[in-house]
Amino acid sequence: MTTLDDACAFFKISSFLSRLAFRRPTAGVLMLLAIAGWTVGCKNDAQVFEEKMQAFVAIEASVLKQWEQAQKTEDKQAAAKIYEAAAAEWAKATAIARELKGCNLSENKRKFASLLADYCEKRGALLQLLQQEALNNSIQVQSAKDSINLELEKLNAQIEALAQ
C-alpha cells in the first residue's frame, strides 16, 4: 500500500469479500485472488534485493575494469585519476549495499547484505589507498593496504561460506 486511500479501498474490498465468503464457498478463492492481484504491482523486498544486486554486479564489473586499467598504466598521475574515478563509482556500490541492509529479507540474505556492506566499505578504503599510493609510494600506505586486504579476504571467506 502506498497511500491511505489504497489502504481504505483494500479494506473495503477485503471486508466485502470476507462477508461474501460466509455466504458462498467460492468467495474465499475470490478473496485470495483479489489480494494477490492487489499486491502484484507492489515490489517486495526480495525483488528489490535482486534488482539492487544486478546493479551492484554491473558497478563491480566496471570498477574491476578500471582497477585493471590503472594497474597497467605506467603514468602514476593517470593511475591516480583512474583510481579516483573507480572510488567514485564504488561509492554507488556501497550505497546499494547499505540500502540492502535496510530491506526485510531472510536471515541468510540479511547476513549477506551486512557482509556486503562491510566489504564495500573496505574496498572503497582500499581504492582510496591505491590512489594515494599512485601519487606517493609510502610504507604507511602499503601497511594499511595489506591490513585492508587481509580484512577483505576474511569477508570474502565469510560471504563464500554463507553462499554454500
Image: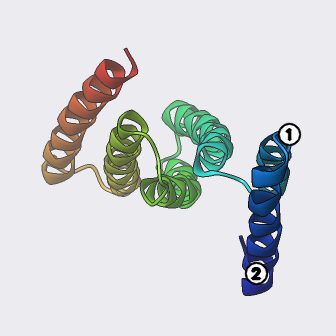
- Using the image as rendered, state which of residue 131 and residue 17 is in the foreground: 17
Give the residue at x 43% y 40%. Answer: 106
Please tell me how crowded label 1 is: few (under 14), some (14-19), or many (20+) other residues with Cα within 10 Å: few
| Above/below status of 15 relative to 77 | below
Q: Which residue carries the number 1 mark? A: 26
Judging depth in this view, the residue of 60 and 28 nearest the camera is 28
Amino acid tagged 2: Cys
Does 95 sit above or below residue 48? Answer: below
Please name the residue shown 58% across and 42% down the image: 63
Q: Position of residue 117 (x, y in %)?
A: 38, 50
Is 150 left or right of 1, judged from the image as shown? Answer: left
Q: Amino acid at mark 1?
A: Thr
Look at the numbered disc 2 and give the secondary structure of its residue.
helix
The residue sitting at 15% across, 41% down in the picture is 147
Name the quadrant containing residue 162: top left
Q: Is residue 76 left or right of residue 12?
A: left
88 over 78 or under it: above or below: below
Badge 1 vs badge 2, beta-carbon distance below 8 Å: no
Residue 8 circle label: 2
In the image, residue 7 above or below residue 18: below
Counting from the top left corner in percent of width and height, residue 152 is at 27, 36
Residue 11 lies, in percent from the top left, at 73, 73
Q: Give the quadrant of residue 98.
A: bottom left
Q: Which mark is residue 103?
A: none
Q: CA distance from mark 1 to mark 2?
A: 24 Å
Location of the C terminus by quadrant is top left
Residue 164 located left or right of residue 158: right
